[in-house]
Image: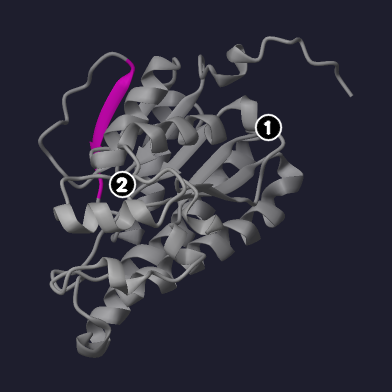
Amino acid sequence: MDKTDGKYLEKLRLDGKVAVVCGGLGLIGKEVVQAFAEAGANIYVLDIKSDEKDKTENVSFISFDVTDANSYEKVFAAIMTEAGKIDIFVNLSYPRTEDWDTHLEDVKAESWKKNIDMQLNTCCLLTRTVAELMRKRGTKGSIVNFGSIYGVVAPDFEIYPKDMTSPAAYAAIKGGIISFSRYAASYYGKHGIRVNCLCPGGVFDNQDEQFVKNYGKKTCLKRMAQAEEIAAATLFLASDAASYITGTAFMVDGGLTVL
């Protein structure tokens, strides 16, 4: 075994690495892109939004519909042609139907199936697509999927005002993403490809004031997360600082799941 060089901070650097961030224009996604940029990565941001496509220094924006699985090979082949490799893939995509926030008893079967397809199935297929590209090129890469605390524990519905809920499909989807990420970690581990699932707790986004207070009381730190705190953990899992971490459901939840 090689002796560590002791330069621990350098292990968090992403210089020379190519990172693809799917859903990179969302609340957390923008912070992840910023963190990766500061760490020196060459970044491709995939998002269905079309208002930030101009290429900036070491960040390229590509319009991408995660629900169109037939486009995956073409889009990622184009990135491979231009960049030569993909070292890091982060999936923050969060497509959902207009009736996503419906209470369980009112969820229509077609809506349930569509959300499962748009979120869980796309995550699994994207993971396979990227892992296969890494494997074929011999890249010992890092894949970070996004799960949730609600893929591990059940929500406490007492914290939600009457007009809010935690969608039932969300629990099924995030639990599935965690399980599949573990499967992929085992399947591709022999190729040096790491697959982890980051599980955030609630992230502050100007939610209902009472909900924010109620939620904070459920955590050890007595508050919701900030998006940059999730991004910092993502940087860690993507970097060589986490070189011996794979298959984990990495909790970033202020201690909610330990109470």
Name which residue type carries label 2: Val
Find disc 1 in the rendering and name its residue. Answer: 243
In the image, residue 218 sits, relative to residue 228, either above or below, namely below
Where residue 203 is drawn, which disc sits there? 2
**At x 36% / y 54%, what residue is drawn?**
217
Residue 158 percent coordinates (x, y): 30, 72
Q: Earlier in the sequence, mark 2 or mark 1?
A: 2
Residue 76 percent coordinates (x, y): 40, 42
**Which residues lie in the magenta part?**
58-64
Residue 30 percent coordinates (x, y): 27, 33
**At x 43% / y 43%, what residue is drawn?**
221
In the image, residue 46 sits, relative to residue 122, either above or below, namely above
Query: Was residue 105 drawn as part of the magenta stretch in this picture?
Result: no
Image quarter hosting the N terminus: top right
Residue 163 percent coordinates (x, y): 13, 72
**Callout 1: helix, strand or loop?**
loop
Name which residue type carries label 1: Ser
Magenta stretch prevailing secondary structure: strand
